[in-house]
């Protein structure tokens, strides 16, 4: 067990370093001059050159790479050209907002995906199944920014269900004292139920949209995996012994379909926590790392973009570790097959 843990830790470290190396050379291909962008449209060549020297952009590529790797191992992701602040500090400041949004969106996606997938599998080839499949196709094909704008128009402007998307709290509310960085949790810890409710309503709007957009893949994999399990020999044997349909569904069907479902949920978690929230955060003025990446890309902020992508890479590596632990929990045969 210890040997296996050390091996996986080593692989994770190599993966993180590999991501950092790739990101350095990929971001070199971005168009535009970061120093020119930072200096502004009317800056002189001397001012641009001064900024280039300040950020080390005048050095040879190998020298820049060496400094970049030294700083990386010191957890220093550089200084933002756009804001002049350390990228690591800015990402850590914005990370709780993204994680809070992503966790609620993931919960919504899993509840919707598993619930609709099981419902479609039980009523396969019937009207309910066809309606669910149509909804899945629509949710998968529709552009997320179009759905987001339509939702803002209907739920905010027309029906008034939610307040205007202007951040993590409506106007007139002060952020709670930071403990976890999650506004809902921090407000509850402070005993401020009013602020907690306002934060939850504000959070629920983008989380519902992000969860809805991420759920179709879970619906499809749950449906197909559950149907295969329900048509297996052990499920037919359970029916022949007279077990109730609910027991067959959950013990023989859904439980034995867990491995591909866990894999898909891991991919969805990476989407909602890392990459899929960029447009959502921008449209809903959510101050997370997705909006930070969007603003950095607009300004060609080289160091901020590097930091963001490295954080995303580390997130996916950690999710893979969590997935492996979930595999072992869901199916002990995984550990037996590996000889442990």
Image (cartoon, helix red, strand yellow):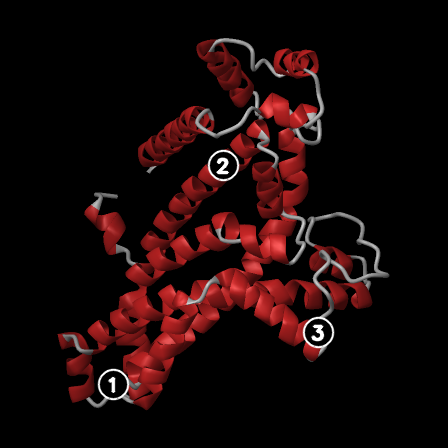
Q: Is residue 175 above or below residue 255?
A: above
- The structure residue drawn at horizontal position 57% and vertical position 25%, both measured from the top left corner, is 75
Residue 205 lies left or right of residue 64; in this view the side is right
Inter-mark Cα distance, 1 to 2: 43 Å
Q: Which residue is mark 2?
A: 309
Q: Secondary structure at mark 3?
A: helix
Q: Which comes before the other along the chain, label 3 or label 2?
A: 3
Q: Which comes before the other along the chain, label 1 or label 2?
A: 1
The quadrant holding residue 298 is top right
Residue 157's disc is 3
Q: Pick the quarter of the image with the N terminus.
A: top left
Disc 1 or disc 3, which is closer to the eye? 3
Q: Which comes before the other along the chain, label 1 or label 3?
A: 1
Residue 174 x, y percent position in the rendering: 84, 55
Q: Which residue is mark 1?
A: 125
Disc 3 or disc 2, which is closer to the eye? 3
- Residue 76 in sight in this render: no
Residue 318 lies left or right of residue 200; in this view the side is left
Q: Pick the quarter of the image with the C terminus.
A: top left
Q: Is residue 65 above or below residue 178?
A: above
Q: Nearer the viewer, residue 251 or 127?
A: 127
Q: Nearer the viewer, residue 9 or 36?
A: 36
Q: Secondary structure at mark 2?
A: helix
Inter-mark Cα distance, 3 to 2: 35 Å
Inter-mark Cα distance, 1 to 3: 39 Å
- The structure residue drawn at horizontal position 66% and vertical position 14%, both measured from the top left corner, is 45
Q: Secondary structure at mark 1?
A: loop
Q: Residues within 10 Å of mark 3 (few under 14, many from 20)?
A: few
What is the residue that sits farthest to the left in this orientation? 233
């Amino acid at each position: 067990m210890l040997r296996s843990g050390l091996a996986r830790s080593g692989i994770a470290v190599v993966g993180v370093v590999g991501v950092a190396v790739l990101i350095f050379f990929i971001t070199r291909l971005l168009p535009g001059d970061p120093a020119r962008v930072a200096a502004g449209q009317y800056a002189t060549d001397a001012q641009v050159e001064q900024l280039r020297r300040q950020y080390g952009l005048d050095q040879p590529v190998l020298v820049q790479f060496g400094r970049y790797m030294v700083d990386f191992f010191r957890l220093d992701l550089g200084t933002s050209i756009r804001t002049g602040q350390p990228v690591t500090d800015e990402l850590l400041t914005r990370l709780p907002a993204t994680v809070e949004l992503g966790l609620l969106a993931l919960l919504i996606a899993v509840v919707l995906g598993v619930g609709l997938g099981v419902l479609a599998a039980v009523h396969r080839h019937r009207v309910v199944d066809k309606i669910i499949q149509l909804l899945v196709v629509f949710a998968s094909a529709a552009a997320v920014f179009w759905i987001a704008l339509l939702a803002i128009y209907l739920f905010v402007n027309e029906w008034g269900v939610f307040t205007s998307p202007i951040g993590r709290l409506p106007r007139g509310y002060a952020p709670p004292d930071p403990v976890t960085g999650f506004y809902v949790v921090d407000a509850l810890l402070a005993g401020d139920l009013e602020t907690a409710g306002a934060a939850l309503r504000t959070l629920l709007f983008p989380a519902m949209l992000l969860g809805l957009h991420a759920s179709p893949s879970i619906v499809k994999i749950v449906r197909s995996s559950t149907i295969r399990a329900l048509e297996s020999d052990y499920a037919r044997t359970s029916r022949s012994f007279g077990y109730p349909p609910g027991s067959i569904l959950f013990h023989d069907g859904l439980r034995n379909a867990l491995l591909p479902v866990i894999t898909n949920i891991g991919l969805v978690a990476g989407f909602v926590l890392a990459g899929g929230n960029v447009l959502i955060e921008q449209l809903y003025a959510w101050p997370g790392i997705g909006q930070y990446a969007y603003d950095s890309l607009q300004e060609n902020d080289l160091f901020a973009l590097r930091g963001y992508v490295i954080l995303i890479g580390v997130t996916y590596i950690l999710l893979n570790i969590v997935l492996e632990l979930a595999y072992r929990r869901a199916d002990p045969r995984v550990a037996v097959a590996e000889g442990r």
